[in-house]
Amino acid sequence: MNKKTIIYITLGGILLVLIILAIIFSKNQGYNNLLSKKATTNINSEKILNRKISYPSLLKEKNNILFLDIVEEKLGVINLETKDSEFISPDLKLFESLYDIIWSPEAKQVFFKIIYNDSFNKWGGFFWESKIKEGENTIWHFDLNENKPKILQNNIVDLLWLSESQIMYIYQENNKSKSLYKSNPQLTNQQKLFNLPNEAFELLNYNRQTNILYYSRSIQSIGGGFDIYKLNLNTGKEEKILGGIRQIFISPDQRFIVYGKYEEDDQTYLLKVDGNQINKMDFIPNECIFYIKDNKPHALLSGLKKNDPLLGMIDLNEGKIIKYIYSNKDIKFYENLILSRDGKALYFTSDDYLYKMEIAE
């Protein structure tokens, strides 16, 4: 091979590399332009409550949001039209013991999950009960029309509101078995439904029309996460749906499931239950709410993309994110997502402050 041939081959190789790089660059530019011009929207958010809060819930009939004031440790309410707020409970004196609040569907009742500590016996307060020992996991039922919460049985592992007058819960029978019960919130009308394995951990979703319950079982093996089971309450038949799950969101009609697998921290999947179709999304959600828009099922996810907080709007039938929504620089996270009654506004917390964002097109 002569010197001239070697030069031609070298120049040809360089030219080929440049062409490939140009094609890749143009494709990336096209994708970025599509994302910035068509799929990305910047919307300003308005802080509507100058209090640090947690566990907000929409009281639909009055267009109010109920919340727990983190500093004052009182339940409060804000009128979304006037922005006026007030407290609706005495000082709860939680002594850093609260680990969850579960509002009823109409936000007229609430369950408090509390790990009892010695401060209650020293200082008393809203949740003081002489028979409770330090370190016990307790669940309290509180009707907002009453003055005092009522402690429920200590062996309740998890519970789920079925309606304003009915709950379902997992009960720890002994060290080796659990059971599924249905009852009124005060536990004065209990009905045992099924025996459950000791690994039963959390009640995820119940559909009254199909009478199907989704729940999780903890995994003891290396790798961790949860297995998701589907239980037909009419027949007692159950089947494993997913395994090794780190997070999961199920639509109210149980047609769509958004989930992330334990060993894949940077991937999220959308499962269409009817056709068992799975779509992958390059998005890591912290929360997800489902809603209907233009008579089509949608979901709104909050999370991170390239370490930036944002919202992802999903067309569930199409199985893909159709829009990314960013907000002003004050927003660090999108947490506790609440959609307004008319679906035109999104309420959320960031750094424990309550914000409003107009999302209607």
Image (cartoon, rainbow, N blue to C red):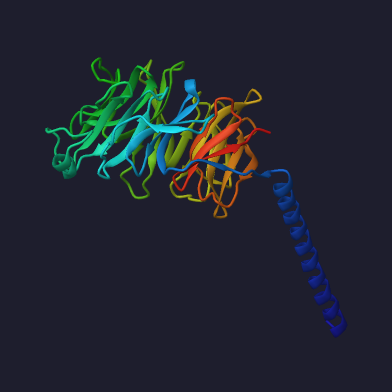
Taking the view exactly as shown, the residue that stands out farthest to the bottom is 3
Q: Is residue 285 found left or right of 24 in the rendered image? A: left
Residue 104, position as x, y percentages in the image: 38, 25
Residue 271 occupies which quadrant of the picture?
top right
Q: Position of residue 358 (x, y in %)?
A: 61, 36
Up-down: is 295 above or below 123?
above
**Residue for point 53% across, 26% down:** 255
Q: Which of 97 and 278 lies nearest the eye of the viewer?
A: 97
For image coordinates 54% across by 55% down, the residue present is 307
- Residue most extreme to the left: 131
Q: Nearer the viewer, residue 165 or 125?
A: 125
Is 177 or 306 nearer to us in this picture? 306
Q: Tell me if residue 84 comes above or below residue 264 in the rendering.
A: above
* Residue 285 seen in the current view: yes
Q: In this view of the protein, can residue 258 be seen by the observer? A: no
Q: How many marks?
A: 0
Quadrant of the rendering where the C terminus is positioned: top right
Q: What residue occupies the far right of the structure in this picture? A: 4
Q: Is residue 90 above or below residue 330?
A: above
Quarter holding the N terminus is bottom right
Q: Position of residue 355 (x, y in %)?
A: 52, 40
Task: Determine the residue positioned at 56% across, 35% down.
Answer: 346
Residue 247: x percent and y percent? Answer: 44, 41
